[in-house]
Image (tube, rainbow, N blue to C red):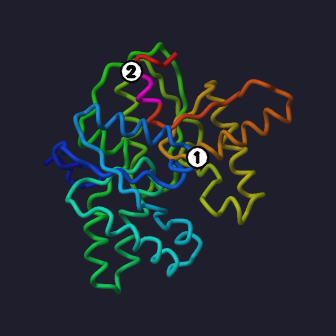
Amino acid sequence: MASDAISGRSYPHKPAHVYLYATCLVDQFAPQAGLDTVQLLEREGITVHFPEQQTCCGQPAHSSGFADEARAVAARQLGLFPEPWPIVVPSGSCAGMMRHHYPKLFADDAARLAQALDVSARIYELSEFLVQVVGFDRPDLGPPCTVAIHTSCHARREMGCHDTSLALLAVLGQVQVKQPARVEECCGFGGTFALTYPDISQAIVTEKVAAIQQTGVDRVVSADCGCLFNITGRSARQDQEAGRTTPSLNGEHIASFVWRRTVGDAA
């Protein structure tokens, strides 16, 4: 069992089985990112189990201040992972919710607290799992390219996944990664924040898009679909308003980007 000096977390040896917690956004809007996650894991000799009863992690309600509603949603997830296998999540935001906030939600419920603690201890964000547990090391089969990277606030501040995302991309020898100015700042999505405060959200994401474009790249990679949709959606609106018919900024989930680069289909 290895240990990360920064987070202090101990990591197991590569397991034979894992659970996949796909997240709502991947399930509903970016299924390819989920399929590519499965392919990345299966290629490493890991059997992936997908509990079909999984729903939302409860974060939207939790971050909006509705603790009881968040508890009700989270409680439905606790019994979905009975085997002692790692739970891999292709989202730092959802992984952060499940690892750090589930035990707090059920602090006054002894029976469910035990389940919450067990689940939270087995949560791994995808890049964290590939780097720290799998030791991902595949040749980069794509042509030279330069991309920007964006890490969600929860992934950066709760999970420390900005480091593992960078480490995962560093394995790809033909990929140059650029970090935009003020890389640690929010993209303006923030789940329900974008709906509650649309004007503020738009102002934030407009600055984020400008910072990414100032790096000179035409593609941004992230491990969180919410951020990707917000950033590329704002860029697409700007393209439309300017009469541009070719996207000035494309976005790709890190699972799909890494998979593409390592199967020789990265043109």
Q: Of label 1 and label 2, which has the lower sequence position?
A: 1
- Measuring from the top left, give residue 62's x and y in whole percent: 52, 72
Secondary structure mostly seen in magenta is helix
Q: Is residue 261 magenta?
A: yes
- Measuring from the top left, give residue 162's x and y in whole percent: 43, 44
Disc 2 marks a residue whose amino acid type is Val
Residue situated furthest left in the rendering: 1
Q: Is residue 210 magenta?
A: no
Total marks drawn? 2
Magenta span? 257-263
Residue situated furthest top in the rendering: 143
Badge 2 crowding class, 10 Å Cα cut-off, few under 14, some 14 to 19, many 20 or more, is: few
Judge from the rendering whether residue 59 lies leftward or rightward of residue 80; answer left or right. right
Q: Residue at x 41, y 71 (%)?
A: 76
- Measuring from the top left, give residue 41's x and y in whole percent: 31, 38
> Tag on residue 57?
none
SS category of the residue bearing label 1? helix
Q: Which residue is mark 2?
A: 263
Q: Which residue is mark 1?
A: 29
- 40 above or below 123? above
Q: CA distance from mark 1 to mark 2?
A: 24 Å
